[in-house]
């Protein structure tokens, strides 16, 4: 069986993407605090929901990247046959 090697560069890239997802989720939380005029303590008390939202954002963008990869592979096969 062949070993799979994940490079450090790839791990760092995924961590940056996950951190960006968390930052986006935190910004959504901050926006809702400002818009609905709720207490600022919710910035920390709602961290569980922010983490869940960050994971959902990460999963959606991961699926979009996978879809793009599959579509680009199909296009390469079609264009390569000509």
Image (cartoon, grey):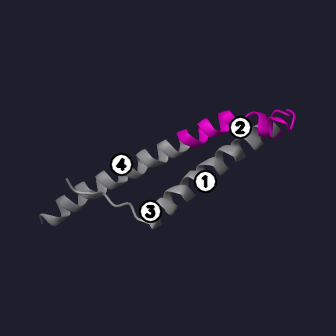
SS class, disc 1: helix
| N-term mark: 3 or 2 | 3
- Which residue is drawn at the image coordinates 66% and 33% (left, top)? 49
Give the number of the disc on residue 19: 1
Query: How much space separates mark 3 and mark 4, taking CA atoms?
Result: 19 Å
What residue sits right under mark 3 in the picture?
10
| N-term mark: 3 or 4 | 3
What residue sits right under mark 2 in the picture?
47
Query: How much space separates mark 2 and mark 1, taking CA atoms?
Result: 14 Å
Q: Position of residue 15 (x, y in %)?
A: 54, 56
Task: Specify the principal SS of the magenta part.
Answer: helix
Q: Is 33 covered by the magenta stretch?
A: no
| N-term mark: 4 or 1 | 1
SS class, disc 3: helix
Q: Position of residue 14 (x, y in %)?
A: 49, 56
How many dots with numbers? 4
Circle 3 crowding by C-alpha within 10 Å: few under 14, some 14–19, many from 20? few
Name the foreground residue: 82 vs 7: 7
What residue sits right under mark 4 in the picture?
67
Q: Is 37 covered by the magenta stretch?
A: yes
- Magenta segment boundaries in residue numbering: 34-56
Query: How much space separates mark 3 and mark 1, taking CA atoms?
Result: 14 Å
């Amino acid at each position: 069986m062949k070993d799979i090697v994940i490079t450090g560069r790839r791990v760092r890239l995924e961590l940056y993407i996950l951190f960006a997802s968390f930052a986006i989720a935190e910004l959504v939380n901050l926006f809702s605090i400002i818009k609905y005029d709720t207490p600022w303590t919710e910035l920390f008390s709602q961290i569980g929901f922010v983490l869940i939202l960050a994971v959902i954002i990460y999963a959606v963008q991961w699926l979009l990247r996978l879809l793009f990869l599959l579509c680009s592979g199909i296009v390469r096969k079609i264009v390569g046959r000509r």
